[in-house]
Amino acid sequence: MQKYLSENIVDIFFILGISSIVILVISALSIGYFIKKIPYDYFLNDKRGISEYKDKNPIFWIITLALKNIIGYCLIMGGILMLVLPGQGLLTILVGLMLSDYPGKFKLEKRIIKTNLILKTINWYRNKSNIPPIIFK
């Protein structure tokens, strides 16, 4: 293993560097899309509503929920690795946290979005896209 690593160190770092750039570009391009998709009144309630897919198609809902959580937890683990390797570690962890389901997630999302700088930035972007700003109680 050590011999393989020493012989291929340049290739490994090249692949890690390209992967980091690809993740950065995908994150940068997709963040605007997701900001637009947040309903303006999403944070008005203290608890998140139940998904309409749960009643309409429970099997599809379970499969989607499982895949979303698996991807989210993989992103969290990858982000933790990227803290010591080249890459967008914190951004990847944040995306993984937003994809995963866990107790207190809605409160955490609300607290992050309520941060003055983040809320101003999100609402500025939504305003540029002619979408109503996110509101709280």
Image (tube, helix red, strand yellow):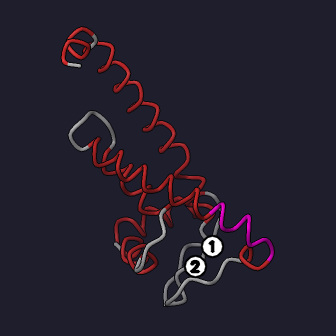
Decide which of 16, 38 is in the foreground and name it: 16
Secondary structure under badge 1? loop
Judging by the rendered image, the residue that carries numbered circle 2 is 42
Magenta stretch mostly in which secondary structure?
helix
- Cβ–Cβ under 8 Å for marks 2 and 1: yes
Looking at the rendered structure, which numbered label has been put on residue 39?
Answer: 1
Secondary structure under badge 2? loop
> In which image quadrant can residue 64 be found?
bottom right
Residue drawn 43% across the image and 50% down it: 74
Q: Is residue 63 magenta?
A: yes
Q: Which residues are magenta?
A: 56-64
Q: Amino acid at mark 2?
A: Tyr
Left or right for 119, reference 90: right
Decide which of 28, 97 is in the foreground and name it: 97
Residue 30 % position (x, y):
55, 47
Residue count near mark 1 (Cα–Cα under 10 Å), binned few <14, some 14–19, many ≥20: few
